[in-house]
Image: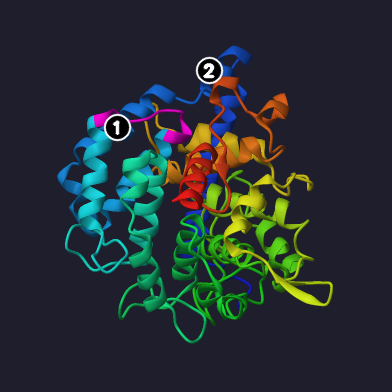
Amino acid sequence: MEASEVPVATVTQRSQKSVESQVGRIYESFAKLPPDAQFRMLELKRENHIDYLKGGLRQLPSSFCGLYALRPWVCFWNLHSLALLGESVDAQLQNNIIDFLSRCQDPNGGYGGGPGQMPHLATTYAAVCSLITLGGHKALSSINRSEMYMFLRQMKQPSGGFRIHDGGEIDVRACYAAISVASILNILDDELGQNVGNYILSCQTYEGGISAEPGTEAHGGYTFCGVATMIMINQVNQLDLPKLIDWLVFQQGKECGFKGRTNKLVDCCYSFWQGGTFALLQRACSTIDQQLVIPVGGKSFEVNFNDIGHNFVKRRVEMEPLFDGRALQLYLLLCSQEENGGLKDKPGKSRDFYHTCYALSGLSVSQHIWSDDVSLLMPRAVLGPYSNLLEPIHPLFNVVLERYHEARDFFTTF
């Protein structure tokens, strides 16, 4: 390069600088406010979020027509967000949602993106988690577990991975959807878990994170899916955890939020995908030495896969947080929160149900990251008014913990 030439910034560099500038201005303005005004700015607009979310369950604008094949996801994003806020839906709406999801259930197992559509592992996860979030006998008994098991077996591949749907791609997301659904429905067995660990291991990259499929780039969403799956099949100790943690900690940037990949922009949804992975590792640190088969008196005692999720959440949080939870809350409350309800990716973007769901999930993780007991939460764990505190989640499934326990009791009884 000639001495007189000026380096030209790449599109990524320009975008990063623009986001940093927008976020920086928000933080500078906040810092100049008196304490009482700062406190008000940090308030979670709970009632406005509830109104926004309930409106999305009743009627969507025409701009959402592109989500026609993702309607169980719209149910999950909104229902889970409401549950995090401690809110439920009325009986009529609950019955309408159960009836709709029942029409999305394929006679041969699994759930499609709408009535009559092909069953798909991602929408199956969304539908099952929606029904668990609604809770109650009608919702939980509507899931055909015997046909679900057969559908999961059909999606299982010799490599250990799962196809996301018949003829679809094989990736880590499909593995997580299949294994998490099987685990929470109490139908996970050796057949479903066979070779899944080897497939996930083949997706851990040189950076330490986990990619969608072998040979691609480490990504926050797939890293969460991979780590959670490895915990559910009791093989998380097979991952290179030090390298994974090295990659994770560098995904929280100067904006205080998380990005999903190296050299990408901050995005509030990764407050869960990355922050939630830290929540898993806090408990996994005490389980990584466990073996799938434990010798007892010369015989083999096989671990019950279906107990792993239940036992995992009962473990004490022994490791201190590896990310700055209060900084993450600052980003979510000041840079992602819309005054009239809903949360958005980053300043300059529009609110939507997806980002609202995973921003609130990440907010819950960052509040509860210091303790597994709400009664022992440190005052510093919640940024802003204590009324900002959200319901805790089960970190493996991203459903509110109370709803998980109800489902666990139901599916181990019936």
Q: Position of residue 392 (x, y in %)?
A: 57, 37
Magenta stretch holds residue 86: yes
Q: Looking at the rendering, in which quadrant would you find the N terminus?
A: bottom right
Q: Residues within 10 Å of mark 1 (few under 14, many from 20)?
A: some
Q: Amino acid at mark 2?
A: Arg
The number of callouts visible is 2
Residue 204: assigned label? none
Quadrant position of residue 280: bottom right
From the viewer's side, name the closer residue of 287 and 301. Answer: 301
Q: Say what secondary structure mark 2 lies in.
A: helix
Please name the residue that numbered disc 2 is placed on.
40
Residue 164 on image: x %, y %:
37, 72
Write down the region rendered in magenta: 83-91
Residue beneath label 1, please? 54
> Which residue appears at 79% of the width and 46% of the height?
318
Q: Is residue 220 above or below residue 42?
A: below
